[in-house]
Image (cartoon, rainbow, N blue to C red):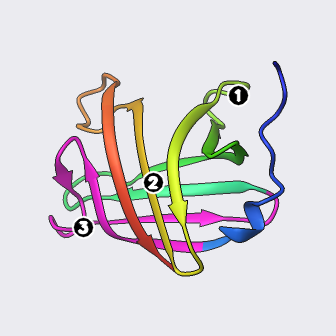
Amino acid sequence: DGDEPSTEKISEITGTWTATKATFNGIDVVEEGGGVTLIIQSNAKFTFTIKRPGRTDMVFTGKLGFDEQWLAVEYDSNPGEYEYYDITYDAHNLHIGANSEFDFDGDGTDEVVIFFLDMTR
């Protein structure tokens, strides 16, 4: 219908989130000694960082919103296009599950990446 996702509830998830578990195509980045952070600003802008030992950090930026129960993600690298992620959260915990497409393995080619994040703030 062309409506923009709502940023009304973004204040409920604003802050810095750190992954306790972050699985990408079955690889737990935290378990392998890396880390994942998600910083959400009150204006709905975000920075998502994946750090893996021996690899260049992956940093994604964009804007978040809600579309019904889904987290709508608009990456700065793909303006006007939204990905929709499963999200549950409370005051201290955030869980996101999604299918996305990016170069997780660093071979220069984007691939489908299924990821699950368990995060705390």
Q: Which mark is residue 96?
A: 2
Q: Upstream in the sequence, badge 1 or badge 2?
A: 1
Q: Nearer the viewer, residue 23 or 94?
A: 94
Residue found 62% across the figure and 46% down from its top: 69
Q: Upstream in the sequence, badge 3 or badge 2?
A: 3
Residue found 19% across the figure and 70% down from its top: 33
Helix, strand or loop for the magenta stretch, by majority = strand
* Membership of 8 in magenta stretch: no
- Secondary structure, mark 2, is strand
Q: Quadrant of the N terminus?
A: top right
- Secondary structure, mark 3, is loop
Horizontal side, residue 59 vs residue 36: left or right: right
Label 3, label 1: how many angstroms apart (C-alpha)? 29 Å
- Secondary structure, mark 1, is loop
**In which quarter of the view is residue 21 placed?**
bottom left
Decide: few, some or many residues near mark 2? Use Cα within 10 Å; few <14, some 14-19, many ≥20: some
- The amino acid at mark 2 is Ile
Decide: few, some or many residues near mark 1? Use Cα within 10 Å; few <14, some 14-19, many ≥20: few
Q: Which mark is residue 79?
A: 1
Decide: few, some or many residues near mark 3? Use Cα within 10 Å; few <14, some 14-19, many ≥20: some
Label 3, label 2: how many angstroms apart (C-alpha)? 15 Å
Residue range in magenta is 16-43
- Are the residues tagged 1 and 2 within 8 Å (C-beta)? no
Horizontal side, residue 63 vs residue 21: left or right: right
Q: Which residue is mark 3?
A: 30
Q: Upstream in the sequence, badge 3 or badge 1?
A: 3
Residue found 26% across the figure and 58% down from its top: 52
